[in-house]
């Protein structure tokens, strides 16, 4: 009996230690044919000040695209990436975007430390009409 109680205490202690770094319950990215929609759910925001969304077309070299302030309690968030058509290349020029993208969330903690979510990948396909309209819009930015 003492052995079982000791094991339960150890398991509980380890769970508490790891639960503190359990920041996101879920993080998904889906293409609706026009935009990429990111959804995530926080587990606890006691030590979180905000989130920065980052995107990559290569799977590395992530670039900042959006900031969302934390609500202060477990919450559900959604972000629509409606600027997916164009991206910056390594030279800073605008080029026609690719179809495969990776996203991650940079989690900003109140103690000024950071953590990163897992990367989520999405395939985003646009029609010819959407590409043409996106190029016209980009000319006037």
Image (cartoon, grey):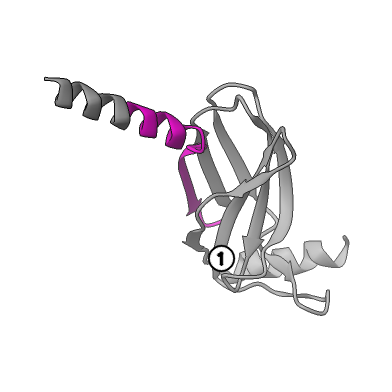
- Asked if one can make out residue 35 in the rendered structure from this viewpoint, the answer is no
Relative placement, left or right, of 40 versus 51 is left
Location of residue 63 (image quadrant): bottom right
User: Over which residues does the magenta segment extend?
Assistant: 12-35
Residue sitting at 23 percent across and 29 percent down? 7
Instruction: Residue 121 in the image: state x and y as whole percent.
Output: 49, 61
Question: In the rendered view of the protein, which quadrant contains the C terminus?
Answer: bottom right
Q: Position of residue 99 (x, y in %)?
A: 55, 71
**Dot 1: few (<14), some (14–19), or many (≥20) neighbours within 10 Å?**
many
User: Which residue corresponds to the image point at 72% horizontal and 64% vertical from the top-left?
Assistant: 134
Residue, far bottom: 91
Quadrant housing residue 5? top left
87 and 118: which is toward the camera: 118
Side (left or right) of 138 relative to 130: right
Based on the picture, tell me whether residue 63 belongs to the magenta stretch. Answer: no
Residue 14 falls inside the magenta stretch: yes
Q: Is residue 118 above or below residue 17?
A: below
Secondary structure type for disc 1: strand
Q: Is residue 11 above or below residue 112?
A: above
Q: Position of residue 129 (x, y in %)?
A: 62, 67
Q: Quadrant of residue 4?
A: top left
- In the current view of this chain or complex, which residue is farthest to the right? 140
Position of the N terminus by quadrant: top left
């Amino acid at each position: 009996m003492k052995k079982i109680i000791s094991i339960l205490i150890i398991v509980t202690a380890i769970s508490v230690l790891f639960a503190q770094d359990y920041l996101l319950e879920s993080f998904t990215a889906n293409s609706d044919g026009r935009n990429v929609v990111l959804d995530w759910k926080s587990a606890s925001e006691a030590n979180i000040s905000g989130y920065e969304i980052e995107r990559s077309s290569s799977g590395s070299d992530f670039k900042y695209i959006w900031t969302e302030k934390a609500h202060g309690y477990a919450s559900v968030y959604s972000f629509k990436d409606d600027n997916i058509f164009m991206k910056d290349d390594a030279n800073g020029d605008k080029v026609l975007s690719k179809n495969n993208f990776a996203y991650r969330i940079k989690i900003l903690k109140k103690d000024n430390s950071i953590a990163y979510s897992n990367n989520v990948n999405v395939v985003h396909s646009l029609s010819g009409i959407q590409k043409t309209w996106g190029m016209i819009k980009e000319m006037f930015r």
